Amino acid sequence: FFQYASVEKDGEVFMTPSDFIRSYLLMLPNENYNKTTVNLLASVADYTGDGLISWPEFQAFEAVLNLPDSLYHVAFQMFDINCNGKIAFDEVKSIFSKTNCHQHIPFNWDCDFIKLHFGSTKENTLNYFEFTQFLQDLQVEHALQAFKRFDTNGKGFIKALAFRDIMETIRPHLLTEPVKEKLVAVVSGSGQQSVSFTYFQAINSLLKNMELVKKIYETVAGKGQNKPVTKEEFLLGAQRVSRLTPLEVDVLFQLSDLCGGKGHITTKTIDMIAPLEEGSMPYSIATQQQVEGRPIFLAIMESAYRFVLGMVAGGIGATAVYPIDLVKTRLQNQRSTGSYVGELMYRNSLDCFFKVLRHEGFQGLYRGLIPQLVGVGPEKAIKLTMNDYVRDQVRRDGKVPLWGQLLAGGCGIRACLLRDIPFSAIYFPAYSNIKEALASEDGHVSPWKVLLAGTLAGAPAASLTTPADVVKTRLQVKTRTGQTGYKGLIDCFKKVYAEEGFAAFWKGAPARVFRSSPQFGITLLTYELLQRFFDKDFGGSKPIGSTHKPKYIHVSDLPPISPDHVGGFRLAAATFAGVERKFGLVLPRFEPAP
């Protein structure tokens, strides 16, 4: 409080409306902000009405934000201009007339609805509990008035575009994005060019009772089940509850069909239609906010944890395909020129495999495995850990851009930069995108799909980087008497091409693909299954497909947008947004143009 308070008066410090709303809560950050709106929003914490917020008032408002009905309390304090704990008609008219909703579709203040609440002379006042009911009913009355306004000929019908205008202006909290897009289509789909009052009421009632729809669906399909339910089955279940009319059910299935239901409703189509619960936000945005808000030591611990799992997974993957790797290496080291008699002993991969098995036995296929594990374990651990770490750093709104995927893959580095950077830069983006494409509707990727994604991604990465692998092998293996020697990368490229031709760079390519594809498939499968099994939470992002993602997460489960937002102030910005959305109290954000 003292950090943001800018006014000192009689030995006390105070926050101005701008201090509170813009500097502390980080709302309305633009320079051309609407000063009236800032003053009005800040008035909810100004209990004395003097235009300043004291330390006791700051503490009192924090307690309000922790109440279960904080949305209604904040709205009540916004309307209580006189700070007397009662809401008068003039206060309601003054505040509501400033909203975008009223300015777009004006409200008739001389209606019977107002007279019933405030009396014919409009001198009655509302206490907190009366005000909460009034605020809910006010939106319904406003929608009815809007319908009458657009029903110019008095026949009980309005045009489809007028219907959409009413819903988006007065009842936006009932609309999900899919429903908003289908509002006109659902009217046209029922064979109407206009919307009757009965149909208007049915849609509003349905969207308001979507929680009831969910309960009826669970009764018919079984709790926790996700099976398609027909219209007839749902109607039978609705009769037992007797609150949904056949017209409302008909509208439900029309919306479901437009969302891909094909004559049925499922949990997916219901989620697309049901309004977002107050205080919730999309899961992809929420998880990104969680990652951005965690301390650095947790990120370090997570990297160390992933490194250990990567070593284990790398060792298992290398062991599983080591015989193929041995065949690949022997073929690549076999020279076509500069050789002594008898060196060209392998015609192809299969010939090499069977000759090793015949002359050296089964154990010959695993010759040199231990040194391989000593190097491969840490190498794969570095690749996997760095790929995950860099992806976390460049993730935006739950997504990793393509350039970020390439950068993350290119940071699996060791001495063989020429081969490993392009391999990893191709492999990890391909793996990530294939896995995402194979994910189920709720984002989960089953183990066999993880294996498939890891294996498929290895084919282009391994084949396209074979020339670099051939050069790496030639440089690493000791030159025998009579064989061509190499001074470095460029020298090796030139001499192999001059002596053996372009085809020499692709030696062992099939064996490399058949080794690398399953090796990385097994490695990534092991790595991800280990993460799922131990399920250690360091506050970072989970691997794609490792969990069944909820569609939404509550804002109270997130870190604050500022470290200075403590206690109830963690939810302040979300609470103001909820008041705007739930009650239609959207105020101008910018000063009007001169």
Image (tube, helix red, strand yellow):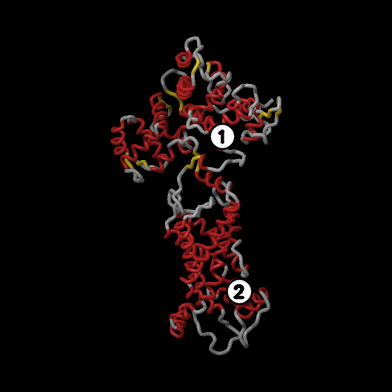
Q: Is residue 278 above or below residue 446?
A: above
Q: Residue at x 41, y 30 (%)?
A: 203
Q: Is residue 123 above or below residue 39?
A: above
Label 1, residues with CA under 10 Å away: few <14, some 14-19, many ≥20 = many
Secondary structure found at label 2: helix
Label 2, residues with CA under 10 Å away: few <14, some 14-19, many ≥20 = some
Residue 324 in the image, given as x and y percentages of width and height: 48, 74
Q: Quadrant of the N terminus?
A: top right
Residue behind mark 1: 572
Q: Nearer the viewer, residue 29 or 537?
A: 537
**Amino acid type at mark 1:** Ala
Would residue 150 be visible to someone looking at this image?
no
Gap between marks 2 and 1 measured at Cα: 59 Å
Residue 508 in the image, given as x and y percentages of width and height: 53, 75
Q: Nearer the viewer, mark 2 or mark 1?
A: 1
Q: Nearer the viewer, residue 161 or 441?
A: 441
Secondary structure found at label 1: helix
Residue behind mark 2: 472
**Amino acid type at mark 2:** Lys
Q: Is residue 425 left or right of residue 451?
A: right
Q: Is residue 474 left or right of residue 220?
A: right
Residue 362 falls in image quadrant: bottom left
Would residue 534 be visible to someone looking at this image?
yes
Q: Residue at x 54, y 31 (%)?
A: 63
